[in-house]
Image: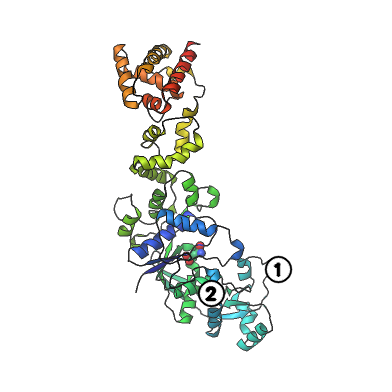
Amino acid sequence: MKTRTRFAPSPTGYMHIGNLRTALYEYLIAKSADGDFLLRIEDTDQKRYVEGATDIIYSTLKTVGMNWDEGPDIGGAYGPYVQSERKPIYAEYAHKLVELGGAHYCFCAPKEDADDDETEENAVPSKFQDPCKRLTLEEARARIAAGEPYTVRQTINKKGKSHFHDEVYGDIEIDYDDLDEGVLLKTDGFPTYNFANVIDDHLMEITHVVRGNEYISSTPKYNLIYETFGWTPPVYVHVPQVMKDAQHKLSKRNGDASFQDLVAKGYLPAAILNYIALLGWNPGDDREIFSLDELEKAFSVERLNKSPAIFDIVKLTWMNGCYIRELSAEKFHELAMPWYEKCLTRSLNLEMLSKVLQPRVETLAEIAEQTGFLEAVSDYNLALYENKKMKTDGKVAATALKLTADRLPQIEQWNNESLFECLKALAAENSLKNGQILYPLRIALSGRETTAGGATEIAAVLGREETLARVEAALSKLGD
Ligand code: GLU
């Protein structure tokens, strides 16, 4: 049987890191077995529908390179792939399930404040008290024919324990008494998730279902539906939630729970994907850097684990730095450009700036922190010129900067290499150490003790005119 998996997001307008990880594992299970990866949009909860949300799902998956074989936009033999377009299918199967004894029609009015699904689902206090279970099918059908609103509610008559196997959590046992007889088809004819997922996974011939462990407790209810129809349930792969720390889930409120948040903070899609692959899966050796292709080759369900997956931004940042350093110089420059445009207005040698920054930043957002002084030197303390290791102080700095100011106009090629050679020669001619020329120059150009890039690199980025202006400004500051 061909392996078929599906990513089934609800269009919330937000790609939570945990959902993207689910999609990745679904994708890897399919692709490592030469199978199909489907995209199904679960939009049956119309009240939660967010405009444009489907596009975010498409663009995120495309950006990370997880292409789907069937889906709403490209079709396929098992469509439609949007649940709201499958309404008649759910109705048909809901009525069939009633006939088979796996569900019953229910006329209990939802509570008055029932304006969301959950309340509607829970409107009946306990399965053993649902008066509609005592209606005969004829009585129920007559009431429906008379126009009475109804829901289709699951019937659970079993007693004892339900058992099922999960690839990550092993053998699971849940008491039938702990299951509620929830709504499967709502009064508006839309299915609940609890029904639609079973019907769709069966009709779409899904072989493996990956989802968060919050679904474990409902799985026996899904299995009852499969059983009543005489269908085989898929292989279950429940994964632990992605946590912020031991107690808290990674939530929207943290501002870094979604793929979009992380991209906006200067993380590269490939690094994010690599990092989340390791949140709950390990390759069995100490490798950490994986492209999507490499993941396909290395992935196996057996190496998924159930320990809580704690999202470690420090680790992601480190990994992102590795990815940044692996980019070609051109690619880094292209990715850095929008960040330059956001924070720099003065005319600078940006190619040079990219060369300086690429080995030194771990996220693209660091570009803003590292380049603030290129716009303007903030007022700084003259004590910065005192540095024991460099053997400089205000006096040495004044001498060195004067020599530098006289020499800079003579430099023919305004680039890092020739600036460096020329200032080294200047130091030698004047019996100074290189640092005694270069350290004061760096302070003069940046007003900072540490910078990404040395004095001559900064000078190359700033250009001759601005470099000279800053050296002159430093000299008059030192002269005051
Ligand atoms: N629409 C569900 C969700 O976003 C899908 C769960 C599943 O994969 O079955 O949580």
Q: Is residue 242 above or below residue 170?
A: above
Query: How far apart are labels 1 and 2 at the CA level?
Result: 27 Å
The image quarter containing residue 151 is bottom right
Residue 112 — which label? 1
The image quarter containing residue 13 is bottom right
Q: Is residue 59 above or below residue 344?
A: below
Whole-percent x and y of residue 472? 46, 16
Residue 185 — which label? none
* Crowding at mark 1 (Cα within 10 Å: few <14, some 14-19, many 20+): few
Question: Is residue 160 in view from this perspective?
Answer: no
Secondary structure under badge 1? loop
Secondary structure under badge 2? helix
Residue 132 left/right relative to 373? right
Judged from this view, the residue extending furthest toward the front is: 412
* Crowding at mark 2 (Cα within 10 Å: few <14, some 14-19, many 20+): some
Residue 177 — which label? 2
Choose between 254 and 353: the one closer to the eye. 353
Disc 1 marks a residue whose amino acid type is: Glu
Whole-percent x and y of residue 466? 45, 23
Disc 2 marks a residue whose amino acid type is: Asp
- Model colouring: rainbow
Whole-percent x and y of residue 337? 44, 39
Disc 1 and disc 2 in contact, CB within 8 angstroms: no
Numbered disc total = 2
Judged from this view, the residue extending furthest toward the right is: 112
Which residue is rendered at x = 39% and y = 69% of the image? 4
